[in-house]
Image: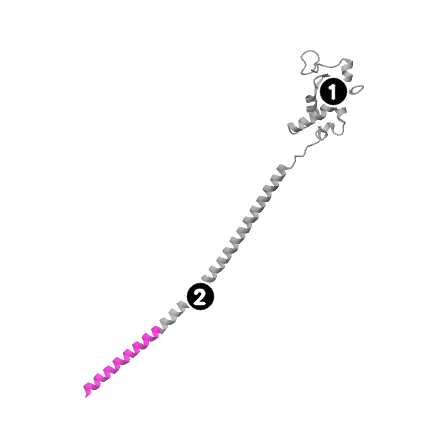
């Protein structure tokens, strides 16, 4: 009977140790469970933050894309407007200066006929319409020079046909001061080949 009691006592101790082990395992499992729950909660928070951040990034991306599209539209509209304005400016008639607006600064405010008479007296030789034009006008291009020359040509013909004439015609488009021609103080012209050139 003593042997049975001993076996029974050992068996009880064994069972108690198993119970303690199971309880410890349960405690460990509970601790592990809590830790895993905490890790899971942390992962959920991280996912939520990422989703919020992603939504914000997507919204920002859409805003930037919309802004870029708006800027692009404004750029093309401005470029189209500029191109149209440039075409209008190019198509607009070019402003043409009056010949008297082209006269050199020293002749501003003086009548064209007086300018011609002054130059002819100072040079003491026959001058062509083109030579006089270069002396009187500051032109920017061939078109301005042609218009200025035409205006001067009309003035020269008018002055030569007056009674008495303001200057004398000494050849084709060539003029000399009247006073010097009468006094015989006229030098040969730069395009003369001995003798006065006569109009054809």
Q: Is residue 164 above or below residue 46?
A: above
Residue 55 image point, x, y percent: 48, 60
Per the image, the residue denoted by label 1 is 120
Whether the magenta-drawn stretch holds residue 2 is answered as yes
| Disc on res. 45 | 2
Residue neighbourhood size for the residue with mark 2, other residues' Cα within 10 Å, grouped as few (<14), some (14–19), many (≥20): few
| SS of the residue under disc 1 | helix
Residue toward you, 113 or 87: 87
Is any atom of residue 44 visible in this view?
A: yes
Is 20 covered by the magenta stretch? yes
Q: Quadrant of the N terminus?
A: bottom left
Residue beneath the point at 47% across and 62% down: 52
Q: How far is mark 2 from mark 1, CA to CA?
A: 102 Å
Query: Which dot, 2 or 1, sits closer to the camera?
Result: 1
Label 2 element class: helix
Could you tell whether 58 is left or right of 127 in the image? left
Please determine whether, in this image, residue 153 is positioned above or below residue 34.
Answer: above
Please name whichever residue, 153 or 126, is drawn nearer the observer in this view of the structure.
Answer: 153
- Range of the magenta residues? 1-29
Viewer-closest of 198 and 194 = 198
Q: Percent position (x, y) of residue 79?
A: 57, 44
Q: Quadrant of residue 199?
A: top right
Q: Residue furthest right?
A: 163
Crowding at dot 1, Cα within 10 Å, few <14 / some 14-19 / many 20+, comes out as: many
Question: Which residue is depicted at the point 57% across and 46% down?
Answer: 77
- Image quarter of residue 20: bottom left
Splitting the image into 4 quarters, where does residue 119 fall? top right
Q: Residue furthest bottom?
A: 1
Q: Main secondary structure of the magenta part?
A: helix
């Amino acid at each position: 009977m003593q042997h049975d009691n001993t076996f029974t006592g050992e068996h009880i101790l064994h069972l108690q140790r198993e119970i303690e082990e199971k309880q410890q395992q349960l405690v460990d499992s509970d601790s592990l469970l809590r830790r895993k729950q905490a890790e899971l909660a942390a992962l959920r928070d991280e996912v939520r933050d990422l989703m919020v951040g992603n939504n914000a990034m997507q919204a920002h991306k859409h805003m930037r894309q919309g802004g870029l599209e708006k800027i692009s539209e404004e750029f093309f509209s401005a470029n189209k407007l500029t191109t149209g304005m440039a075409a209008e400016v190019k198509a607009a008639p070019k402003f043409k200066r009056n010949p008297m607006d082209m006269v050199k600064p020293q002749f501003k405010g003086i009548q064209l006929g007086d300018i011609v008479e002054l130059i002819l007296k100072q040079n003491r030789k026959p001058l062509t319409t083109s030579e006089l034009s270069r002396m009187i006008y500051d032109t920017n291009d061939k078109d301005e020079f042609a218009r200025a020359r035409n205006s001067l040509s009309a003035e020269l013909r008018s002055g030569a046909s007056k009674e008495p004439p303001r200057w004398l015609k000494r050849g084709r488009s060539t003029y000399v001061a009247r006073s010097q021609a009468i006094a015989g103080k006229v030098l040969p012209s730069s395009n003369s080949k001995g003798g006065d050139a006569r109009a054809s």
